[in-house]
Image (spheres, rainbow, N blue to C red):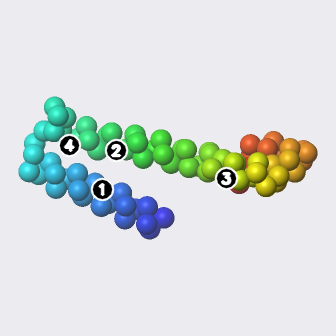
Amino acid sequence: MAAALLQHAVTLGTLWLIFLKVPALGGGNATQAVVLYAIFSIAMGLVNLLGAGLRGLPNLVETGVRDGLLVLPASAFFQLTD
């Protein structure tokens, strides 16, 4: 959690430094850049939360582990996202 907070602080600090020197970039201001960054961060957070286990799916198919997941009573999707 500390690493994520540090990453966001560095990114927002960089945006702040850029917009100190340049009042508008491509017609957008600092507030619009921060909102865009927030939307992107929320979207990436949801992708990581809901689909993190799906990255290893090709490996599970190749090794045959996926077949074992399909015979269990729980949904295979929810087993992969744990």
Indicate which label's residue lies in the foreground, 4 or 3.
3
The residue beneath circle 2 is 37
Q: Distance between the residues labelled 4 and 3?
A: 38 Å
Q: Distance between the residues labelled 3 and 1?
A: 29 Å
Q: What residue type is labelled 1?
A: Thr
The residue beneath circle 3 is 56
**SS under mark 3:** helix
Q: Which amino acid does label 4 sit on?
A: Ala
**SS under mark 1:** helix
Circles 4, 2 touching at the beta carbon (< 8 Å): no
Give 66 or 43, whichever is nearer the viewer.
66
Q: Quadrant of the C terminus?
A: bottom right
Residue visible at 16% across and 31% down in the picture: 27
Q: What residue type is labelled 2?
A: Tyr
Residue 19 visible, this orientation? yes
Residue visible at 26% across and 41% down in the picture: 33
Q: Is residue 4 left or right of residue 20?
A: right
The residue beneath circle 4 is 30
Q: Does label 3 or label 2 sit earlier along the sequence?
A: 2
Q: Where is residue 52 in the image (x, y as percent from the top left)?
A: 61, 51
Q: Distance between the residues labelled 1 and 4?
A: 13 Å
